[in-house]
Amino acid sequence: MAGRDHAGTFDDFVAARYAALVRSATLLCGDHHDAEDLVQGALVKAVGVWHRIGDDPEPYVRRIMVNDNISRWRKHRGRVVVREQVPDTDTAPASDSDTRLDIEAALATLPPRQRTVVVLRYLEDLSERQTADLMGTSVGTVKSQARDALAALRRVVPDLTVHRGAPDQVAR
């Protein structure tokens, strides 16, 4: 019966958090299909040690996703990635979906480490310490990567602002 409870807990976690994990992974990867693969791989790794993860499995699963994504970009370093063209927003009034496309296109221009910092810090609302722990780096590196990433994003999306306060948010 204990095995049944174990499976039920994992199934409940996946049912409740899968969409959020895929959203985060899409922002990390820049591609929905790669994101689904990243989440699936993380869940496969997590289910094997589910009994050891504890009551809050999401940080553990996110750490797997970040590590696997880092391994993926190291493995594919130097390959050319062809992205779809983002529609020209000058011809239509700005909407939330246009803003989202602008931010996604801007994120795609960042190097992988900077992109990861922006996603974790500003879109997933993690602290500098939590981001550093997930990335396996120092808080100082997170700060410098965030600074450089935000400067690069402001060059691509000039009216980009970072709301200070609780929580940090990237907006346009």
Image (cartoon, rainbow, N blue to C red):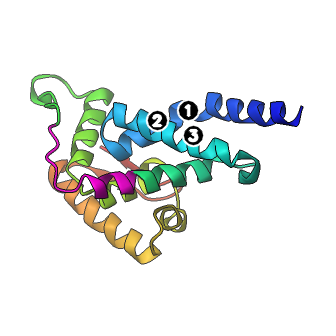
**Label 2 secondary element:** helix
In depth, the one of 99 and 64 nearer the eye is 64
In depth, the one of 57 and 101 nearer the eye is 57
In depth, the one of 48 and 64 nearer the eye is 48
What residue would you read off at disc 2?
Answer: 22
What residue would you read off at disc 3?
Answer: 44
> From the viewer's perspective, is 55 left or right of 35?
right
Residue 2: horizontal and vertical position, in percent? 87, 36
Q: Quadrant of the N terminus?
A: top right
Q: CA distance from mark 1 to mark 2?
A: 6 Å
Q: Let me know if residue 96 is in the magenta part.
A: no
> From the viewer's perspective, is 63 left or right of 163?
right
Q: Residue at x 67, y 35 (%)?
A: 13
Q: Residue at x 43, y 52 (%)?
A: 68
Q: Quadrant of residue 7?
A: top right
Q: Amino acid under label 1? A: Tyr
Q: Amino acid under label 2? A: Val
In the figure, 40 relative to 131: above or below? above
Disc 3 crowd rating (10 Å Cα; few below 14, some 14-19, many 20+) is few
Q: CA distance from mark 1 to mark 3?
A: 13 Å
- The mark found on residue 172 in the picture is none
**Marked residue nearer the N-terminal end (1 or 3):** 1
In the figure, 18 relative to 93: above or below? below
